[in-house]
């Protein structure tokens, strides 16, 4: 309703301006240029007619009278009307143009201010934006919600990262203290029995390996923020790559008592970055071994369509709760919250895997139920 009144007011204002223009023209012609106009009008549209006649006394005289040249007058009025219409149209267009620009600038300025107030404040959208800005209000609500969600994700990642660094730096002390302690004993007791000496050396070596793992986790955290993943694609023999990888994991598999059932055809090829994809498969297989029950089988198989290839990794172990399953690909997220466990690293393996698969225009998902956990990677064939 308010917009209708505004349009009526604009129309009345345009009519009023047109009346002023026409009255000004009339006053200029009738008052200011009265004599000059009459002379000009007479010269152009009035004709003098001379007609002789004989008077009563027989004298021939001439009668003079004037006639109006209607055709010339009509053409002049027509041309004047067209010119007037053009002038009025141009004037109205110019005035409307500047008026519209001014209103647009005012509207944009108001919209910017309202956006600034809404994004920087705690008010609801309906408290900041009037009904006329309902569409902008809806869009700003979505943008603000997305920004807040993204900021919350970044805060959660930062908190997990900070907690992880605190835990790691604290955990570094324990194996380091043990290594120093046992080496000190070996240094002081030169006549220590061989059996006891070998025992202390074994403990020191085990703690050194633990210390190395913790230091590698710290390096992985700092390196993640500095690296930029770039792909160098080529044709990959997937079957050969997975066979090599399972051979490399043989010692770890033996330690856990696990076996791998590799069901991938020899002629399975895909196009991608072999080094980056090897890192993805390595991370998933390492997790599968770490979280599997002892003496269980880890199965790897593929399913192929005309356009994409799906690669599956399945292991038997504790079922991952839905809450953790949804966060499994987030940075610095660990399934084992206790730092005393040897499973899991800095919580970056699966996050990096997801980034690499996404860069390959693929997807990576996880499903866990009834003690079976399955990772599925889909990749385009070309």
Image: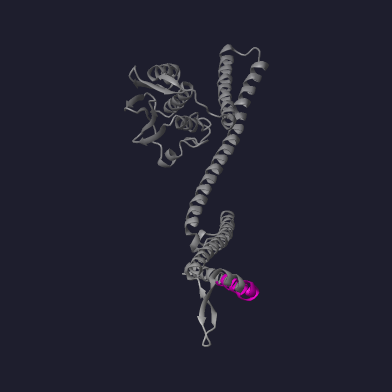
Render colour scheme: one colour
Q: Say if 138 sits above or below 210 in the image.
A: below
On screen, residue 260 versus residue 134, left or right, reads left
Residue 122 seen anywhere in this rendered image of the structure? no
Q: Nearer the viewer, residue 339 or 41?
A: 41
Q: Give residue 352's position: percent from left, percent from top.
A: 50, 31
Residue 136 % position (x, y) = 50, 56
330 or 373: nearer the viewer: 330
The quadrant of the rendering that contains the C terminus is top left
Residue 36 appears left or right of 341: right
Magenta stretch encompasses residue 20: yes
Q: Of residues 208 and 250, which is closer to you in this image?
A: 250
Query: Is residue 366 placed above or below 254 in the rendered structure?
Result: below
Q: Main secondary structure of the magenta part?
A: helix
Name the residue at 39% across, 34% down.
366
Instruction: Identify the residue at horizontal 53%, vertical 72% (top origin).
Output: 47
Residue appearing at x 34%, y 28% in the figure: 307
Q: Which quadrant of the structure image shows residue 42? A: bottom right
Position in image of residue 75 (x %, y %):
49, 65
Q: Residue 3, percent across and down?
A: 48, 67
Vertical arrangement, residue 40 with respect to residue 59, above or below: above
Task: Point out the stretch of residues depicted in magenta.
Answer: 19-36
Q: Nearer the viewer, residue 97 or 123?
A: 97
Q: Is residue 155 magenta?
A: no
Q: Quadrant of residue 59?
A: bottom right
Q: What is the residue that sits farthest to the right in this orientation?
A: 188
Specify whether residue 180 is in view. yes
């Amino acid at each position: 309703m308010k917009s209708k009144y505004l349009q009526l007011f604009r129309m009345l204002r345009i009519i009023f301006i047109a009346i002023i223009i026409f009255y000004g023209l009339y006053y200029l012609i009738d008052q200011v240029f009265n004599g000059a106009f009459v002379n000009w009008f007479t010269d152009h549209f009035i004709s003098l007619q001379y007609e002789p006649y004989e008077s009563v006394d027989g004298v021939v005289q001439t009668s003079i009278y004037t006639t109006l040249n209607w055709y010339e007058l009509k053409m002049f009025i027509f041309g004047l009307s067209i010119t007037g219409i053009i002038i009025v149209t141009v004037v109205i267009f110019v005035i409307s143009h500047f008026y519209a620009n001014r209103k647009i600038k005012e509207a944009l300025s108001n919209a910017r201010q309202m956006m600034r107030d809404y994004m920087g404040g705690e008010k609801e959208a309906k408290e900041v934006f009037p009904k006329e800005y309902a569409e902008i209000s809806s869009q700003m609500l979505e943008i603000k919600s997305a920004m807040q969600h993204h900021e919350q994700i970044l805060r959660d990642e930062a908190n997990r990262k900070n907690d992880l660094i605190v835990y790691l730096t604290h955990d570094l002390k324990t194996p380091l203290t043990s290594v120093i302690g046992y080496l000190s004993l070996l240094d002081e007791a030169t006549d220590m029995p061989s059996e006891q000496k070998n025992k202390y050396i074994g403990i020191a070596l085990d703690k050194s390996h633990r210390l190395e793992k913790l230091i590698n986790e710290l390096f992985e955290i700092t390196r993640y923020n500095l690296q930029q993943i770039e792909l160098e694609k080529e044709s990959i023999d997937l079957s050969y790559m997975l066979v090599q990888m399972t051979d490399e994991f043989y010692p770890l598999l033996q330690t856990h008592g696990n076996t791998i059932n590799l069901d991938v055809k020899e002629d399975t090829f895909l196009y991608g970055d072999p080094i980056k994809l090897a890192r993805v498969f390595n991370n998933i297989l390492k997790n599968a071994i770490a979280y599997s029950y002892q003496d269980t089988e880890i199965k790897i198989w593929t399913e192929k369509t005309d356009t994409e290839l799906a690669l599956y990794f399945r292991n038997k172990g504790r079922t991952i709760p839905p809450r953790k399953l949804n966060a499994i690909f987030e940075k610095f997220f660990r399934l084992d919250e206790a730092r005393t466990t040897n499973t899991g690293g800095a919580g970056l393996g699966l996050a990096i895997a997801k980034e690499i698969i996404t860069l390959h225009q693929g997807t990576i998902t996880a499903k866990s139920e009834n003690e079976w956990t399955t990772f599925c990677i889909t990749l385009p064939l070309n």
